Image: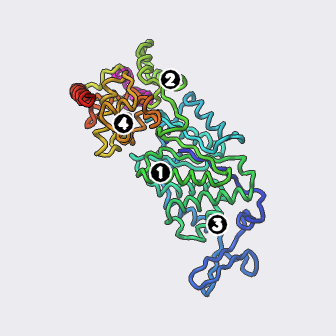
């Protein structure tokens, strides 16, 4: 479910005296880089004012910052960054994007929030369950803003793609910002000359020196920079390696947002946690979006395969798919990708397989062809994140919800039935917010747990799909009978 951070910045305009020497466009400046026993000299005039790359080997070492230094800065950042994390990298060439008619209101909300000078908050947090189109939304927004010059930088985490190292985040953002903003590049060049080991420092120092301070200088030099906010997108923070690193990244960004000027804006897109604005799966717009997505793909397929019958597909089958998707964009996207696969070129048969799976009949045990394989891999990865000691608790919770999805059990009631403390219940669900709606602890006595989408229950109950995490209906019924007896035993 994903993060978006907004910075405001623009190319140099009229600068204040405080920073005019540092940010003077196209002017060659000389900075001394002191070492042991040397004197620090800063010079923009005198007999060596026009010298380039001049080094004194005595007690004073002078280094002239010019175009070659900027190139060296870019090269140093490039060595530390992760190019695959950028929205326009070849690695992301075939990633999902929003079609023209999907997630319209969310994309409009982002733009309106960015453009609103009277916004009440500099933090906007969108959340949503697994595979509902959070990353597709972020990718589409990135491309749209890139076209009009208002995209600053992007970082899309991906654990399967090994884009999960937290130490590559700041250099990747700084590299992109330096490539699109000359003033920012000059400031960062000066900082890296002053501290050649800056890129080896911890994340907090790098973030402060390479992101926070340069934009503070830009703001001090040109207050009108706030008129054109740049968007920095960080998506899928939950796929960053290590929970501690995830928390650290969020905390350091939030700390700097609270402590700096309005140059800072942040938008997070991530799986649900405990608050903030949620991207719904089953609201009216999401349901319309999934039908549009299916309709667009069917039009494309019919154009390509002109031999298809005029009445294909049947309206009831289209409705069946839409009902099963219930607003889940990822579910529908995987289905359309499956039956529209040009390499297989068999849309009729594959569409019928999709309808069968959507009808709850499961994957064919003979062919084992699964149109939701990509979604299942995502579900498998989510459950795999649960620690070995917490997995039995999580599976018990899943079992109750799968067996009686229409039974409304509050978190407190469910914990009581499973003979768990409230703390144990929430611990067992700690890594599963992407697939399970977990109410905040203060509402545990009034709100139930539920799966975000029925496809997760189907996944858990189908051995072909869930493998080692399969919940057998027969064993599940037996376990629930035993658990009921245990629970009754505590009532006397």
Would residue 344 be counted in the magenta stretch?
A: yes
The tag on residue 287 is 2
Q: State the extent of the magenta-drawn residues as a range.
A: 331-358
Closer to the observer: label 4 or label 1? 1
Q: In the rendered structure, which disc, 2 or 4, sits on the residue that comes first in sequence?
A: 2
**Is disc 1 in contact with disc 2, using a CB cutoff of under 8 Å?**
no
Question: Label 1 to label 3, Cα distance in Å?
Answer: 38 Å
Is residue 22 visible in the rendered structure shown here?
Answer: yes
Q: Position of residue 212 (x, y in %)?
A: 61, 57
Q: Which residue is mark 3?
A: 67
Question: Label 1 to label 2, Cα distance in Å?
Answer: 33 Å
Q: In the rendered structure, which disc, 4 or 3, sits on the residue that comes first in sequence?
A: 3
Q: Position of residue 164 (x, y in %)?
A: 43, 51
Q: In the rendered structure, which disc, 1 or 2, sits on the residue that comes first in sequence?
A: 1
Task: Using the image, determine if residue 129 lies above or below residue 159.
Answer: above
Q: Which residue is mark 1?
A: 247
Question: Label 2 to label 4, Cα distance in Å?
Answer: 22 Å
**Is disc 2 in contact with disc 4, using a CB cutoff of under 8 Å?**
no
Residue at the spot x=63%, y=67% of the render?
190
Residue at the spot x=49%, y=49% of the render?
85
Outermost residue, bottom side: 58
Q: Are there few (<14), some (14-19), or many (20+) residues within 10 Å of tag 2?
A: many
Task: Using the image, determine if residue 355 lies above or below residue 256.
Answer: above
């Amino acid at each position: 479910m994903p993060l978006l951070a907004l910075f405001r910045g623009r190319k140099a305009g009229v600068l204040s005296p405080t920073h005019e020497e540092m940010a003077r466009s196209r002017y060659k400046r000389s900075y001394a880089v002191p070492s042991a026993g040397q004197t620090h000299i800063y010079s923009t005039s005198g007999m060596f004012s026009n010298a380039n790359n001049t080094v004194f080997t005595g007690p004073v070492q002078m280094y002239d910052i010019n175009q070659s230094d900027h190139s060296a800065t870019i090269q140093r950042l490039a060595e530390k960054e992760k190019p695959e994390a950028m929205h326009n990298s070849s690695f992301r060439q075939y990633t999902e994007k929003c079609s023209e008619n999907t997630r319209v209101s969310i994309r409009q909300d982002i733009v309106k929030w960015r453009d609103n000078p009277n916004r009440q908050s500099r933090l906007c947090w969108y959340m949503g369950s697994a595979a509902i189109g959070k990353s597709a939304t972020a990718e589409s927004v990135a491309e749209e803003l890139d076209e009009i010059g208002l995209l600053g930088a992007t970082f899309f985490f991906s654990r399967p793609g090994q884009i999960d190292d937290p130490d590559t985040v700041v250099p990747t953002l700084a590299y992109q910002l330096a490539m699109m903003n000359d003033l920012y590049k000059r400031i960062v060049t000066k900082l890296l000359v002053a501290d050649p080991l800056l890129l080896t420092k911890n994340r907090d120092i790098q973030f402060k020196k390479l992101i926070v301070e340069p934009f503070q200088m830009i703001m001090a030099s040109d207050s009108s920079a706030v008129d054109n906010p740049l968007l920095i997108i960080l998506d899928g923070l939950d796929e960053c390696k290590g929970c501690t690193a995830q928390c650290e990244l969020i905390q350091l960004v939030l700390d700097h947002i609270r402590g700096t000027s309005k140059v800072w804006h942040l938008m997070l897109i991530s799986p649900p946690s405990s608050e903030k604005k949620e991207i719904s799966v089953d609201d009216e717009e999401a349901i319309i979006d999934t039908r549009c997505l299916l309709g667009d793909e069917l039009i494309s397929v019919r154009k390509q395969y002109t031999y298809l019958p005029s009445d294909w597909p049947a309206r009831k089958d289209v409705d069946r798919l839409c009902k099963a998707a219930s607003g889940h964009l990822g579910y529908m996207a995987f289905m359309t990708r499956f039956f529209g696969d040009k390499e297989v070129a068999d849309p009729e048969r594959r569409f019928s397989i999709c309808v069968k799976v959507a009808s709850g009949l499961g994957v064919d045990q003979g062919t084992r062809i699964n149109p939701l394989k990509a979604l299942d891999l995502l579900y498998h990865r989510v459950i795999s994140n649960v620690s070995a000691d917490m997995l039995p608790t999580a599976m018990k919770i899943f079992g109750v919800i799968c067996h009686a999805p229409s039974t409304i059990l509050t978190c407190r009631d469910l914990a009581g039935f499973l003979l768990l403390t409230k703390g144990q219940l929430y611990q067992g669900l700690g890594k599963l917010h992407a697939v399970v709606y977990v109410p905040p602890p203060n509402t545990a006595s009034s709100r139930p747990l539920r799966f975000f989408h029925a496809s997760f229950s189907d996944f858990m109950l189908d051995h072909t799909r869930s493998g080692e995490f399969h919940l057998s209906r027969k064993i599940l019924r037996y376990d629930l009978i035993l658990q009921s007896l245990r629970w009754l035993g505590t009532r006397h």
